[in-house]
Image: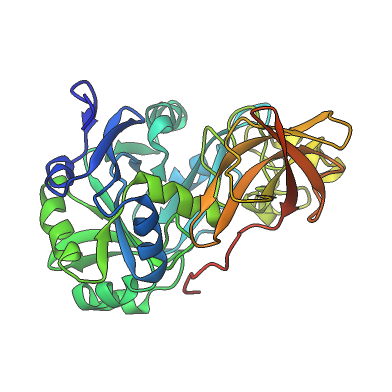
């Protein structure tokens, strides 16, 4: 157990310690990195059955008012005005240079917009929203609420027993539900590449709900270690590693998050920070791209490792890397110069002075299990 007395605590802190979690600092919080089952088994259990993740360190924010969608759309690359009630979308905050300030999920909850932003960015994101809100928008942080993620092929069966109306939900649906009699706001989404749900719940109800979910034989608690290996196999970016203010959506291979109506020629083109820069890159291309990487052998290639061409010239860098338990091999993501981004391109990873052959690969590294 680490010395985490100066760290913030999530509502389920006591339960994590009761369950034998190894707690580590993450984004200013004491968070469970693993439980006695261990990272490898937690990962595989999530792929085979269901894992319960505590992601209460993430920032939950609600926007109210007739101008909320327009205000948010002016700050992001997404089609917020066209987001239908009960639906969720992935989008990006950008700056004037087209750099990514944060990536986040936004739901049309009917009478308001509900956002889930990254833990390390949430204070800045809240200030960003408040600075642009104007008189027609009210910004309300919900940082005190808990957020649980139930992920894996058995998640739907468990949720169907505790919240029968969840059976009707498909990927990226969002709605208020009672889960085991507890009022929650639920989305059918996640960060693992598996079918699953994210459940926003009042802090005082989090322990009761978590214990009900963990009472199912199919459900195991899973920490941040397996969450990272699961998202990497799924080809999902981690903010601050695979993207940040020095990368644009086009460089990060996230141009799909620039909605069609916001692109040049769209009905509401541009109008967000850096739109001209991103439009130019969509038209002309970029000098580097985020790609999937498959190193040869069994040794993981970690973040920060340089990628070289056949002449030993640096052509890129790894931004996320590790061993993929479900893939059964090392997997990674990183940036390479244009000309090396095609699937099948070969580069070399320089690991402690030794060159490891690496092949540029498609992501995700395994087929996702979303219910569409």
The relative height of residue 205 versus residue 242 in the rendered view (above or below) is below
| Residue drawn at (58%, 64%) of the image | 366
- Asked if residue 323 shows in the view, the reply is yes
Q: Which residue is nearer to you in this view: 190 or 311?
A: 311
| Residue drawn at (22%, 73%) of the image | 163
| Residue drawn at (34%, 55%) of the image | 111
| Residue drawn at (81%, 47%) of the image | 346
| Residue 353 appears left or right of 108 | right
> Where in the figure is residue 19, as x and y percent of width and height?
16, 49
Place residue 159 in its image quadrant. Answer: bottom left
Q: Which residue is nearer to you in this view: 265 or 358?
A: 358
Place residue 299 in its image quadrant. Answer: top right
Q: Quadrant of the N terminus?
A: top left
- Asked if residue 80 shows in the view, the reply is no
The relative height of residue 150 versus residue 118 in the rendered view (above or below) is below
Q: Which residue is nearer to you in this view: 61 or 214?
A: 214
């Amino acid at each position: 157990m680490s010395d985490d007395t100066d760290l913030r605590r999530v509502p389920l802190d006591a339960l994590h310690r009761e369950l034998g979690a190894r707690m580590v600092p993450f984004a200013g919080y004491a968070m469970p990195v693993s439980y006695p089952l261990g990272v490898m088994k937690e990962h595989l259990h999530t792929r085979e059955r269901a894992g319960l993740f505590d992601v209460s360190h993430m920032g939950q924010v609600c926007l109210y008012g007739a101008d909320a969608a327009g205000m948010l759309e002016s700050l992001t690359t997404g089609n917020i005005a066209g987001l239908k009630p009960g639906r969720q979308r992935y989008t990006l905050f950008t700056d004037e240079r087209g750099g990514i300030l944060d990536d986040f999920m936004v739901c049309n909850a009917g009478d308001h917009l509900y956002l889930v932003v990254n833990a390390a960015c949430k204070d800045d994101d809240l200030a960003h929203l408040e600075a642009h809100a104007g008189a027609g928008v009210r910004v309300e942080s919900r940082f005190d609420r808990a957020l649980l993620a139930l992920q894996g092929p058995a998640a739907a069966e468990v949720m169907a027993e505790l919240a029968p109306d969840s059976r009707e939900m498909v990927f990226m649906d969002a709605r208020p539900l009672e889960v085991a009699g507890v009022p929650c706001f639920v989305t059918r989404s996640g960060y693992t590449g598996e079918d699953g749900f994210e459940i926003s719940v009042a802090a005082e109800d989090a322990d009761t709900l978590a214990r009900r979910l963990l009472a199912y034989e199919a459900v195991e608690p899973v920490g941040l270690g397996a969450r990272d290996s699961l998202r990497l196999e799924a080809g999902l970016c981690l903010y601050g590693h695979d993207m940040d203010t020095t990368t644009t959506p086009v460089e990060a291979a996230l141009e799909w998050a620039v909605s069609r109506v916001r692109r040049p020629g769209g009905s509401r083109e541009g109008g967000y920070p850096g739109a001209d820069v991103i439009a130019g890159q969509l038209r002309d291309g970029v000098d580097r791209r985020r790609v999937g990487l498959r190193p040869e052998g069994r040794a993981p290639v970690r973040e920060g490792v340089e990628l070289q061409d056949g002449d030993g010239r640096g052509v890129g860098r790894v931004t996320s890397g590790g061993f993929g338990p479900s893939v059964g091999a090392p997997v990674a993501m990183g940036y390479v110069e244009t000309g090396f981004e095609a699937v099948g391109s070969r580069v070399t990873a320089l690991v402690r002075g030794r060159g490891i052959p690496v092949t540029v690969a498609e992501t995700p590294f395994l087929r996702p299990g979303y219910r569409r």
